[in-house]
């Protein structure tokens, strides 16, 4: 049947159904979206899955599943997949694991994972090298290590684990020949003793003495972390201390610095404030508070098997530790794409009018929407780019931002504004193109399940958040989505929207200028080239970990690893800042090279796509050739390693005058002979300290 | 509730926790089931406590020698004794 040629009423799908039609997926979504705008649809939405394309008569089979129809797998379902040795097992296992709330569920899933591995069930992707992770602590690290392994594996980051002996962490770190050092960990997770984190003097001791003891306790732990880091080069993850959940001292609990409550609070604070670059805090105090202290303690578990906390908190702890490990090499999202009606304000502006929408302090709902806008504005100040993606007439939508006095967000806060009647998935892709960003760096937020589902179906790389019916929960949903947690904050983050908007002005100038050279000259560009230093390190690491497109080798490095390059004799590593008459781009390019004999090899070269086609590439090679000659080098060697995202630089080295040495589809090796190389003159003024 | 009824209910819990669930009988003990290691044990105890709405006292589970004695312990805790 050609369902979509029938009367609209007939399209309402009440249960999962298979539909055959000539329509392409994008068309199907469009038609569906239009239907959804009308009132006669009985079931608000359904998911579309393309089952099969019949090439001979261009027909497609789709499965349509109404939203709310629970077709998701449960534990029994994936047991079945495993029994049939179905590779979809792995995807479902990851999905179930990320939803699993209870300890027993996580353990069951972990057992299934181990069973699948031992049965030889193939996994789609397996080329990620395992990270070497050591867990040390004053408690039993079992089943902690099992849960952690499971979270890491199911998030696509296999690990190789070292488990310290029970309460042996001090000697494991202090003895240079211990098995810990032979293991050569990339990351060490340390759970220091909760039992020893207490003031040992009298409860009546004066506050200064107690404070000094707490600082001293923190120093001891930080010293241990430093020793471990210096001996292994590993990044450290330090689990801090949970606060007690019992009344114990009554009011004096918070008045005496000698109480366990206050002592642990000071120690936690000292640990966090004094944590060096290589150390990250796994905040058990926060996790305990979030779950509830009484639910987090487990005295019996401690007496019986030396468990650090309740099984539930153990799951929280492992999730957090896995997250800290995973985001060493992953970037937070960059763009928040927002719906308008019933997302940024209550009501529909096209129906209710400018006066009729709910926003501002005159009603409870209006306040909730205003609070949501305030939170979004704070995300923008942290460096998140905002975009509008709404089904509306452009004029009606923009009018709200221009004229409504209660609006917190204004037109200038957005880097893209798409209010039209195209499918939102198409709009998001268009915005991504305009900003030169991957659609996978987008988070899309909407109150309408139909719109969210369209984006899920037709732009699956976009992360979506369905806000649902209560605006009071909007802020907390964004806060808990964990998509915008910066690894570090740099001063440049707050300037990002201005930078992107300035870029749009430049594009406008470019489209009016006909001669590229004249245009570049008119920009009055100035570059600062500087060898790596400690101040720039956080931004350099940020760029190394999030640049995908203009990135020749995509080698990720943590901030601690960047620090290690500073002052290294055989390494020439530098960054480039760029500004022009429209604004400051900040630090936009990173180059790491290694010198061996008379050759300089480019280990890493990446650049922010905001400054493409501005001759920064030519400037970098010119500067690199000058620096290489000054260091008695005769050649520069460059390597291109292909990824799913860096095709734009596949021919960069030949374009820069390098000769191919070996070229294969997945990689290429090129050499620049400095004896016959004349640097290209650019329109960029530059200063350099290489 | 009788011991037999507890064991019937325990079978449901075992079916959830074990990949290849053993037949639960009074004589069954951890050493009879290869999958019943200390990890599964912790998981099993958490599930049993949640299912029956009870909490064991420190050390008393490890003092039981088989499922029959374990079921009696559950009955004892169900009585609130």
Image (cartoon, coloured by chain):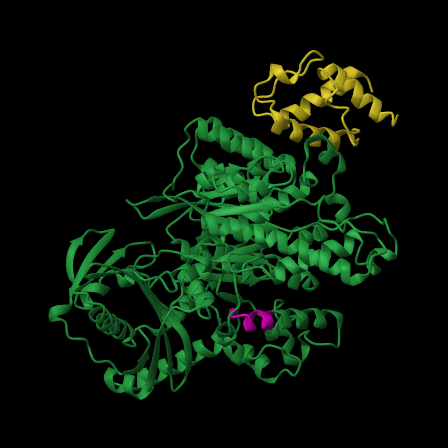
Residue closest to the eye, A187 or A542: A187
Residue A404 locus on image (x, y percent): 63, 82
Q: Quadrant of the C terminus of chain A?
A: bottom left
Q: Residue at x 25, y 51 (%)?
A: A666
Tell me if I can see residue A417 in this picture.
no
Residue A292 locus on image (x, y percent): 74, 49
User: Which quadrant holds residue A341?
Assistant: bottom right
Q: What's the magenta region?
A: A376-390
Residue closest to the eye, B72 or A212: A212
Residue closest to the eye, A53 or B27: B27
Task: Chain letter for yellow, please.
Answer: B
User: Which quadrant holds residue B30?
Assistant: top right
**Is A505 displayed left or right of A245 in the figure?**
left
| Residue at the limit of the structure toward the left, as seen here | A676
**Image height check: is A359 above or below A313?**
below
Q: Quadrant of the N terminus of chain A?
A: top left
Q: How many marks?
A: 0
Residue A624 locus on image (x, y percent): 25, 70
**Image height check: is A189 above or below A453?**
above
Tell me if I can see residue A498 in this picture.
yes
**Is B21 displayed left or right of A555 in the figure?**
right
**Is A58 displayed left or right of A392 in the figure?**
left
Check if residue A379 falls in the magenta segment: yes
Check if residue A603 falls in the magenta segment: no
Residue closest to the eye, A412 or A58: A412
Q: Residue at x 79, y 21 (%)?
A: B73
User: Which quadrant holds residue A315?
Assistant: top right
**Image height check: is A333 above or below A189?**
below
Q: Residue at x 70, y 63 (%)?
A: A472
**Image height check: is A488 above or below B44?**
below
Residue A444 locus on image (x, y percent): 52, 62
What colour has chain A?
A: green
């Amino acid at each position: 049947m050609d369902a979509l040629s029938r009367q609209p009423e007939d399209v309402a799908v009440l249960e999962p159904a298979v539909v055959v039609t000539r329509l392409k997926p994008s068309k199907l979504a469009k038609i569906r979206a239009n239907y959804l705008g009308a009132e006669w649809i009985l079931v608000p939405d359904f998911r579309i899955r393309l089952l099969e394309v019949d090439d001979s008569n261009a027909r497609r089979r789709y499965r349509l599943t109404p939203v709310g129809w629970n077709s998701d797998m449960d534990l029994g379902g994936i047991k079945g997949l495993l029994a049939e040795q179905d590779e979809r097992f792995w995807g479902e296992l990851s999905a179930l694991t990320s939803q699993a709330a209870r300890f027993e569920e996580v353990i069951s899933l972990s057992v299934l994972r181990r069973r699948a591995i031992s049965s030889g069930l193939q996994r789609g992707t397996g080329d990620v090298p395992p990270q070497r992770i050591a867990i040390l602590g004053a408690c039993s690290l079992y089943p902690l290590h099992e849960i952690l392994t499971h979270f890491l594996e199911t998030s696509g980051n296999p690990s190789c684990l070292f488990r310290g002996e029970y309460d042996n962490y001090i000697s494991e770190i202090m003895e240079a020949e211990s098995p810990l050092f032979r293991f050569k960990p990339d990351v060490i997770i340390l759970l220091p003793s909760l039992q020893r984190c207490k003031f040992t003097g009298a409860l009546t001791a004066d506050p200064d003495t107690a404070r000094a003891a707490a600082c001293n306790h923190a120093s001891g732990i930080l010293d241990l972390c430093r020793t471990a880091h210096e001996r292994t080069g590993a990044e450290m993850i330090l689990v801090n201390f949970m606060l007690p959940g019992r009344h114990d001292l009554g009011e004096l609990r918070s008045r005496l610095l000698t109480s366990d409550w206050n002592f642990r609070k000071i120690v936690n604070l000292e640990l966090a404030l004094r944590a060096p670059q290589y150390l990250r805090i796994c905040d058990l105090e926060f996790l305990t508070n979030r779950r509830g202290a009484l639910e987090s303690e487990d005295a019996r578990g401690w007496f019986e098997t030396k468990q650090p906390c309740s099984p539930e908190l153990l799951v929280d702890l492992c999730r957090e530790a896995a997250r800290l490990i995973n985001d060493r090499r992953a970037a937070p999202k960059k763009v928040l794409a927002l719906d308008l009606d019933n997302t940024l304000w209550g009501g529909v502006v096209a129906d209710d009018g400018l006066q009729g929408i709910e926003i501002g302090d005159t009603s409870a709902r209006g306040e909730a929407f205003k609070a949501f806008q305030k939170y979004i504005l704070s995300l923008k100040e942290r460096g998140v780019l905002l975009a509008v993606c709404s089904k509306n007439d452009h004029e009606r939508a923009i009018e709200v931002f221009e004229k409504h006095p209660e609006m917190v967000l204004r037109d200038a806060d957005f880097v893209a504004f798409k209010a039209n009647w195209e499918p939102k998935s198409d709009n998001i892709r268009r915005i991504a193109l305009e900003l030169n960003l991957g659609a996978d760096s987008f988070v899309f937020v909407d109150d309408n399940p139909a719109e969210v589902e369209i984006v899920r179906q037709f732009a699956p790389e976009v992360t979506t958040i369905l806000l649902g019916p209560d605006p009071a929960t909007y802020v907390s949903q964004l806060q808990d989505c964990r998509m915008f947690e910066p690894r570090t904050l740099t001063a440049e983050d707050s300037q990002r929207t201005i930078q992107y908007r300035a870029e749009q002005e430049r594009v406008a100038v470019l489209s009016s200028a006909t001669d590229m050279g004249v245009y570049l000259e008119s920009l009055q560009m100035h570059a600062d080239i500087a060898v790596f230093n400690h101040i720039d390190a956080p931004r350099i690491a940020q760029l190394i970990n999030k640049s995908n497109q203009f990135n020749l080798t995509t080698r990720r490095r943590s901030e601690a690893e960047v620090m290690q390059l500073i002052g290294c004799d055989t390494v020439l590593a530098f960054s480039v800042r760029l500004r022009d008459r429209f604004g400051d781009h900040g630090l936009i390019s990173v180059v790491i090279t290694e010198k061996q004999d008379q050759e300089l090899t480019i280990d890493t070269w990446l650049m922010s796509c905001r400054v493409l086609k501005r001759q920064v590439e030519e400037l970098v090679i010119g500067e690199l050739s000058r620096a290489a000659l000054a260091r008695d080098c005769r050649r520069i060697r460059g390597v291109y390693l292909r990824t799913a995202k860096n095709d734009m630089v596949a021919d960069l080295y030949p374009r820069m005058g390098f000769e191919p040495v070996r070229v294969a589809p997945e990689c290429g090796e090129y050499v620049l002979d400095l004896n016959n190389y004349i640097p290209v003159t650019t329109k960029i003024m530059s200063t350099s300290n290489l | 509730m009788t011991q037999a009824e507890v064991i019937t209910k325990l079978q449901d819990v075992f079916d959830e926790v074990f990949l290849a669930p053993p037949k639960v009988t009074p004589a069954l003990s951890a050493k009879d089931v290869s999958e019943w290691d200390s990890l599964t044990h912790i998981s099993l105890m958490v599930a049993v406590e949640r299912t029956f709405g009870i909490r064991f006292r420190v050390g008393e589970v490890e003092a039981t020698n088989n499922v029959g004695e374990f079921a009696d312990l559950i009955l004892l805790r169900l009585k609130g004794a």
